[in-house]
Image (tube, grey):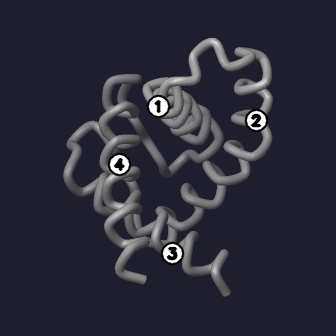
Amino acid sequence: MEIIINILVAGTAFFIGAKLLPGVEVKSFMQAIVVALLVAVLSYTLGTFLKIVTLGILSLSIFSWLLNAILIQVADWFLPKFKVLNFWWALGLAAIVSITSAILGNIF
């Protein structure tokens, strides 16, 4: 049940981020849920690999923020109805998703 709540919270965060940022486009709430699922899968696979490759050199939280932006760009490449104009919009979306997920996660 916790996984479902986490995905719904992340999907809501992506949907809110897409509404706030003009450089990010998500067609519907269901598409935001799909984006959240894909980014979660990418985080566990590609994200883990990238953390191992860096060997903790960039262990600051800034690296986590940059990594999330990279994973959002990869998700943009895979999903045709999810568009992020450039890396800067992905950074902004990563920040909004992170903040919104933290707030909603504490509520639920």
Q: Secondary structure at mark 2?
A: helix
Residue 15, x across and y down, in percent: 36, 62
Say what secondary structure mark 1 lies in.
Answer: helix
Task: Single out the mark in the foreground, 3 or 1.
Answer: 1
Is disc 2 surrounded by few (<14), some (14 to 19) or many (20+) residues within 10 Å?
Answer: few
Around disc 4, counting alpha carbons within 10 Å, would you say few (fewer than 14), some (14 to 19), or many (20 or more)? many
Q: Which residue is mark 3?
A: 8
Q: Are marks 3 and 4 in contact (CB under 8 Å)?
A: no
- The reply to whether the C-beta atoms of the residues labelled 2 and 4 are less than 8 Å apart is no
- Mark 2 or 4: in front is 2
- Which label sits on residue 48? 2
- Identify the residue under disc 1: 61
> What separation in Å lies between label 2 and label 4 (alpha carbons)?
27 Å
Instruction: Estimate the spatial distance between the alpha carbons at disc 1 and disc 2, rounded to whole Å.
Output: 15 Å
The residue where tag 4 is placed is: 25
Question: 73 or 81: nearer the eye?
Answer: 73
**Secondary structure found at label 4:** strand
Residue occupying the point 58% across, 23% down: 59
Residue 51 position, x and y percent, is 71, 27
